[in-house]
Image: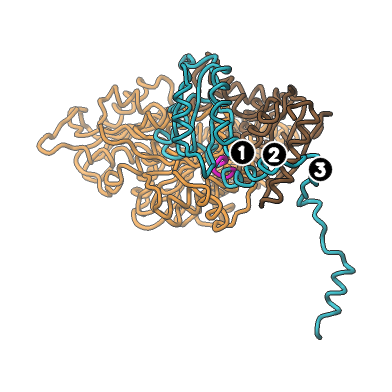
Chain colours: A brown, B orange, C cyan
């Protein structure tokens, strides 16, 4: 079982596929859960305090907007932790944690820089593409040693 | 307690910058309630295409759709707060275009703000207060004539001012630099009363504004405690006798600057800046000090100089002062340096703030800095308009407070204080 | 600033999304309640939200998935069910993430179809997806041929 970063990190489809084929998905919910379950100072709604954009300085410089750095504080540690990544490139309508295009560009770049198995694809638009899409993900995850 | 003002938030990034709760808190303080207009995915894609601004960030697409839902009346709100990350170019474009779009197509008051992770509820408070005032108290802001005997106190960051008015005329004034907030307020009030030969007991209603408004308001048992954005715009159009139609009010203050568009005496868009002191009245004070003149002499001095002969355009008061010292050391004349300082402040207000409001004539400059002739001249050159400085413009907040306070005179009581 | 004390430390929450002709979210909910044993289950418009200790949540999910494996999907959630911070009733509108799920819901039928296909086909034998970036563009020779065949 390996840790697979999913992009978009909020994806229901990727989260399901990774679990279904025997691995652990790393995505937004995991990072948010960690914050929501940790005592500290209250910061609604996501328990992301003004300290988080400062932690984000590890991945983006101070002239980068706070929202990018705050989001990077969610994703940065998971990018470092992951053993593989699946990226959907035309995820143009993933909001919230994936709502900032600049963060998304940086996030994809960091994943591509990392020397790990990666699969890049696009959302299917019909049944035939759907079969190819799922087959590619299944094969990729099987090759990582997941469930057949 | 009246129902809260429903403020629709259009934003990208505040929850990831850790400042959403600051926004909520600022709204709550002024009996406002933040909410997010409800749209469905099909609305987002349709509205985004219809709006025609091809941004990449999904949350900005969502903000566009939410704005269109407000303008189309699919979602009801009393006011709109637009907030995006400071230094994000994509978001800045959306923020400006949405503000313009909402103002052109609806009657909703809008305030926009670019935050950092350091933004606090305190910073947002004046803006939120102005927003809820415009949404809730249109009747109060409709007042055009001062009645009875009223007192207005403006406890500003640099100076404290008092104005006593009777039957639509100014009968007493008080002015002094702010040191101890309450002591200064009492002294300027005493001065205004003495000038009019009147006692505080005769005053029928009191209004306070400025940074110290809450403290001073409590001390004087004020009838109206109101932020300076709405009060100053009201005071400006009243003094300039431009209570009908459009106007733009520019107030370069000691700590922050306001640019407000007004229609029939009611503020529409406004910006309030104050991150960098290089664009503040304080910089002109420092310039006057360094040139060895009184602040009142800086304006006339600047009018004799040529600002373009001295390079000066720093956002920062420290670097700005450095340019000033360098220029003097290099042999520039005091007149040129004074003119350059005025131009530098005007240019930065022009670049940083006036781009966010649609300038409509008449352009009224108010506040203490409007008495600095050189500054008004520099601003007029930049905007290419003839700027109007109304009489008593340095007392703008106090006049606005006294004017609006007359709405609180109770029938049958001739003395409330 | 106010101190924050979490109310659900040590639990996990997962969404169960039902996109099926044969099973309704209500059917899945009934099955989940039967085997809940301390796991909190909340129904919503697209399925369930399940919260509890990780092993218990996974046990319930494994069981309900069996009802229609290719049509029931699961995703992690950061917040416990009904949390006011993410609730449409308190926010006025849906939290942004909801629209992302709304978008993927439209693609789920293709995924379900694929999962059923892959029950009897070998994933490794299926051609890789075409990428829009790699999709062949019209080459100039073909374009020229097309132009030449046009009537003047």
Q: In this view, does A117 lie to the left or right of C66?
A: right
Instruction: Tell me, for residue C70, which label it has, or none.
Output: 1
Same chain shared by disc 1 and disc 2: yes
Tag 1 secondary structure: loop
What whole-number distance in Å separates the C-alpha atoms at marks 1 and 2? 10 Å
Q: How many discs mark residues in the rendered view? A: 3
Check the residue under mark 2 and report the chain it is in.
Answer: C
Q: Mark 3 points at which residue?
A: C125
Camera-side residue: B282 or A18? Answer: A18
**Residue C61 relative to residue A90: left or right:** left
Residue at the spot 68% in from the left edge and 48% down from the top edge: A124
Q: Residue at x 38, y 41 (%)?
A: B230
* Quarter containing the N terminus of chain A: top right
For residue A36, the mark is none
Please name the residue that numbered disc 2 is placed on.
C119
Q: Are marks 1 and 2 in contact (CB under 8 Å)?
A: yes
Measure the C-alpha gap from mark 2 to mark 3. Answer: 13 Å
Residue B293 visible: no
* Foreground label between 2 and 3: 2
């Amino acid at each position: 079982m390996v840790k697979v970063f999913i992009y978009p990190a909020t994806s229901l489809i990727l989260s399901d596929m990774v679990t279904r084929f025997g691995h652990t998905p790393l995505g937004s919910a995991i990072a948010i859960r960690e914050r929501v379950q940790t005592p500290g100072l209250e910061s609604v709604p996501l328990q992301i305090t003004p300290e988080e954009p400062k932690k984000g300085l590890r991945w983006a410089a101070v002239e980068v907007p706070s929202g990018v750095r705050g989001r990077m504080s969610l994703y940065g540690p998971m990018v470092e932790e992951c053993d593989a990544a699946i990226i959907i490139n035309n995820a143009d309508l993933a909001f919230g944690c994936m709502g900032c295009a600049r963060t998304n560009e940086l996030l994809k770049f960091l994943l591509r820089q990392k020397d790990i198995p990666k699969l890049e694809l696009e959302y299917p638009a019909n049944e035939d593409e759907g079969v190819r899409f799922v087959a590619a993900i299944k094969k990729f995850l099987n090759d990582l040693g997941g469930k057949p | 307690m009246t129902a809260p003002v429903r403020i629709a938030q259009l934003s990208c990034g505040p929850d990831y910058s850790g400042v959403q709760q600051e926004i909520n808190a600022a709204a709550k303080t002024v009996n406002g309630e933040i909410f997010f207009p409800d749209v469905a995915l099909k609305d987002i894609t349709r509205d985004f295409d219809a709006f025609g601004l091809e941004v990449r960030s999904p949350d900005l697409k969502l903000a566009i759709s939410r704005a269109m839902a407000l303008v189309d009346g699919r979602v009801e709100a009393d006011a709109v707060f637009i907030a995006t990350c400071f230094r994000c170019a994509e978001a800045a474009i959306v923020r400006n275009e949405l503000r313009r779009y909402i103002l052109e197509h609806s009657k909703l008051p809008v305030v926009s703000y670019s935050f950092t992770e350091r933004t606090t509820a305190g910073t947002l408070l004046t803006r939120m207060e102005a927003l809820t005032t415009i949404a809730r108290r249109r009747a109060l802001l409709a007042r055009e004539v001062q009645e009875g005997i009223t007192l207005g106190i403006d406890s500003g960051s640099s100076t404290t001012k008092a104005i006593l008015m009777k039957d639509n005329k100014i009968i007493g004034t008080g002015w002094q630099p702010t040191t101890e907030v309450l002591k200064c307020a009492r002294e300027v009030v005493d001065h205004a009363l003495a000038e009019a030969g009147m006692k505080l007991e005769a005053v029928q209603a009191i209004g306070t504004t400025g940074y110290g408004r809450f403290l001073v308001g409590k001390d004087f048992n004020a009838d109206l405690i109101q932020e300076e954005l709405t009060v100053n715009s009201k005071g400006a159009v009243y003094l300039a006798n431009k209570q009908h139609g459009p106007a733009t009010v520019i107030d370069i203050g000691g700590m922050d600057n306001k640019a407000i568009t007004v229609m029939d005496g009611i503020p529409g868009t406004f910006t309030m800046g104050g991150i960098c002191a290089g664009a503040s009245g304080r910089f002109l004070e420092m310039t006057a000090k360094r040139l060895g003149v009184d602040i009142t002499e800086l304006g006339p001095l600047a009018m004799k100089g040529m600002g373009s002969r001295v390079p000066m355009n720093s956002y920062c008061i420290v670097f700005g002062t450095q340019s000033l010292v360098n220029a003097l050391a290099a042999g520039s004349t005091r007149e040129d340096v004074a003119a350059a300082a005025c131009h530098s402040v005007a240019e930065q207000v022009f670049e940083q703030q006036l781009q966010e409001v649609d300038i409509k004539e008449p352009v009224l400059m108010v506040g203490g800095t409007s008495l600095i002739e050189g500054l008004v001249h520099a601003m007029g050159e930049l905007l290419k308009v003839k700027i109007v400085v109304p009489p008593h413009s340095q007392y703008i907040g106090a006049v606005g407070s006294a004017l609006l306070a007359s709405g609180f005179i109770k029938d049958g009581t001739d003395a409330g204080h | 600033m106010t101190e924050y004390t979490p109310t659900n430390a040590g639990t996990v929450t997962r969404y169960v999304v039902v996109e099926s002709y044969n099973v309704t979210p209500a059917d899945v909910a009934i099955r989940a309640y039967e085997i809940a044993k301390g796991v909190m289950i909340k129904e919503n418009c697209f399925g369930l939200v399940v919260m509890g200790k990780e092993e218990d949540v996974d046990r319930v999910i494994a069981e309900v998935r069996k009802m229609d494996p290719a049509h029931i999907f699961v995703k992690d959630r950061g917040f416990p069910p009904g949390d006011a911070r993410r609730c449409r009733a308190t926010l006025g509108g849906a939290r942004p993430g909801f629209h992302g799920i709304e978008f993927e819901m439209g693609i789920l039928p293709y995924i379900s179809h694929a999962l059923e296909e892959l029950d009897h086909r070998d994933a490794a034998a299926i051609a890789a997806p075409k990428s829009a970036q790699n999709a062949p563009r019209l080459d100039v020779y073909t374009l020229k041929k097309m132009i030449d065949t046009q009537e003047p």
